[in-house]
Image (cartoon, helix red, strand yellow):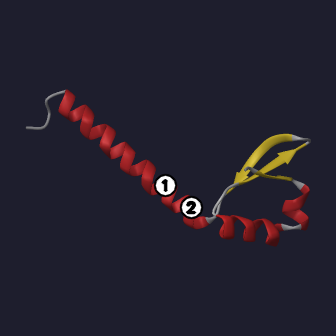
Amino acid sequence: MEIIRPSADLRNRYGEISRICRETRKPVYITVNGRGDTVILGLTEYEQMKSELELLRILAESEEDLAQGRIA
C-alpha cells in the first residue's frame, strides 16, 4: 500500500512524515495539486538503495567484460 500525502504536510507535519518513513521503511509519495511530485525515503533505505545500484552497476560491467573477452 502506497503512502501518499499532500505537499502541505511537508510544512505542517514533517515530523509525522519522517516517522512514517523510518518506522515503515517505505517511501512517502508527496503530491502537488493531486499529482505525484516527490518521494521521501528514510536515510537507511536510501543508503541501501544506493549500495544495491552500485552493486548492479559493477555486475553489469563485469558481465560486459566477460562478453567482450576482457577477463580471462
Instruction: Identify residue for label 2.
Output: 45
Residue 61 location, x and y as percent? 29, 38
In the rendered view, does 55 fall on the left or right side of 62? right
Q: Residue 36: name its quadrant.
A: top right
In the rendered view, does 52 fall on the left or right side of 4? left
Disc 1 versus disc 2: nearer the observer: 2
* Foreground of the two, 51 or 25: 25
* Residue occupying image coordinates x 78% and y 65%: 17
Which three-letter amino acid code belongs to the residue tagged 2? Glu
Residue farthest top in this picture: 68
Q: Residues within 10 Å of mark 2 (few under 14, many from 20)?
A: some
Residue 58 drawn above or below residue 45: above
* Residue occupying image coordinates x 40% and y 50%: 54
Q: Secondary structure at mark 2?
A: helix
In the rendered view, does 58 fall on the left or right side of 7? left
* Residue occupying image coordinates x 74% and y 48%: 38
Instruction: Identify residue for label 1.
Output: 50
Measure the C-alpha gap from mark 1 to mark 2: 9 Å
